[in-house]
Amino acid sequence: MKPLVIVTRKLPLAVEKRMQELFNVKLNDDDHPFTKDELLCAVQEATVLVPTVTDKIEAEIINAAGTNFKMIANFGVGINHVDLASARARMITVTNTPGVLTEDTAEMAFSLMLGIIRRVNEGERMLRAGKWQGWAPTDMHGTRLFGKKIGIIGMGRIGQALAKRAKAFGMGIHYHNRNPIHQDLEAEFGATYWQSLDQMITQMDVISLNCPYTDETHHLMNNHRLGLMQKHAYLINTARGEVIDEKILIEKLLSGEIRGAGLDVYENEPQVKKDFLTLENVVLAPHMGSATTEARQAMGDKVIINVKTFLDGHSPRDRVIS
Ligand code: DGY
């Protein structure tokens, strides 16, 4: 009997078909998010679990795993929903899907930026509500992106893909990262490195969050840092909701201390704070940074390669821990 692979969510059809050809796989046909009990059963039964960001793989789940359980092959790049310390202690291999959703997530950050700064979504709401009276010189003024400064927090693959796009739009590129990127890349983007995040924030017209969510980045945008943003500045988040203290962000958006925000991710998904739903100066997307046919297929391909490599007795390339 081949080792059992349990997939927690419905994946693109071609990915599921290939998994059925290669593995003894249990799929989730109705795509319901797994409950905690289902996750507990899955890790007792399976050798490999293929979860997504909607599954909280906490210590309790990992510690309940059966002796056959050997691998968590995440469908997605962010891995903050998996308790890596517990997985390491149990010598469970964990993989993710980096590099294949980079352009897609950068596109989403850019869409949110255009949506909020050029008021596209607000304009559409007004039009659909039948309130448009026709073109007017003083109507629906947004802000020009050209010539504005973007501060990218987290200059990894996605941050760099965003920088490329922002440069093409004539924006000045600034970034904060643990370390500066290679000087050739810096020159390509014409980017300025800021060692001090706080100082960078005070100077930017747009701040984009592109860092992973870790203990260090929990509420990175807190009262202090949101307070450092210029009154006319915008905040874009395609990283993880927990990087922002949402309660404070709402206060600042309501009081006009920050001009606007474009959000793809939230602190308690799929719940979205009610105030966000009524604010005009926010563009909201339902965590869809990697939601393109191309990216989701490529993420599935990566999962398959990672699982197959592991089950064949080799070390998967995308291992986060092993
Ligand atoms: C990712 O890949 O991290 C996306 O946010 C979905 O999990």
Image: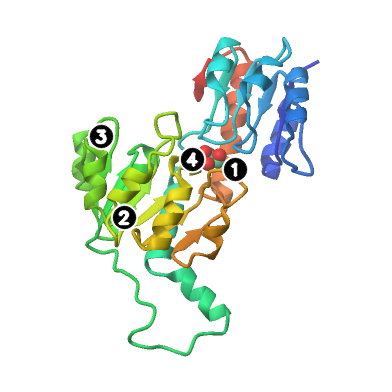
Q: Looking at mark 4, is its residue's CB closer than 8 Å to ligand 1? A: no
Residue 162 is situated, as x and y percent measured from the top left of the image, at 35, 49
The residue to which callout 4 is attached is: 242
Instruction: Looking at the image, tell me whether mark 2 or mark 3 is earlier in sequence order.
Output: 3
Q: Amino acid at mark 1?
A: Gln
**Numbered disc in front, either 2 or 1:** 2
> Are the two marked residues, 4 and 3, in contact with CB atoms closer than 8 angstroms?
no
> SS class of the residue under badge 4?
helix
The residues tagged by marks 2 and 1 sit, at their Cα atoms, a distance apart of 32 Å
Tell me the number on the disc at residue 297: 1
The residue to which callout 2 is attached is: 206
Instruction: Looking at the image, tell me whether mark 1 or mark 4 is earlier in sequence order.
Output: 4
Is residue 224 shown above or below 301?
below
Instruction: Looking at the image, tell me whether mark 2 or mark 1 is earlier in sequence order.
Output: 2
> SS class of the residue under badge 1?
helix
Q: Residue at 65%, 32% (x, y): give it.
A: 51
> Are the two marked residues, 1 and 4, in contact with CB atoms closer than 8 angstroms?
no
The residues tagged by marks 4 and 3 sit, at their Cα atoms, a distance apart of 25 Å
Quadrant containing the N terminus is: top right
- Taking the image as drawn, is residue 104 in sight? no
- For label 1, count other residues whose C-alpha is less than 10 Å away and answer few (under 14), some (14-19) or many (20+): some
> SS class of the residue under badge 2?
strand
Q: Amino acid at mark 2?
A: Val
Is residue 57 shown above or below 14?
above
Which quadrant of the structure image shows residue 213? top left
Residue 4 is situated, as x and y percent measured from the top left of the image, at 75, 21
Q: Amino acid at mark 4?
A: Glu
- For label 4, count other residues whose C-alpha is less than 10 Å away and answer few (under 14), some (14-19) or many (20+): some
**Numbered disc in front, either 1 or 3:** 3
Instruction: Looking at the image, tell me whether mark 1 or mark 3 is earlier in sequence order.
Output: 3
- Asked whether 39 or 257 is in front, the reply is 257
Q: Amino acid at mark 3?
A: Ile
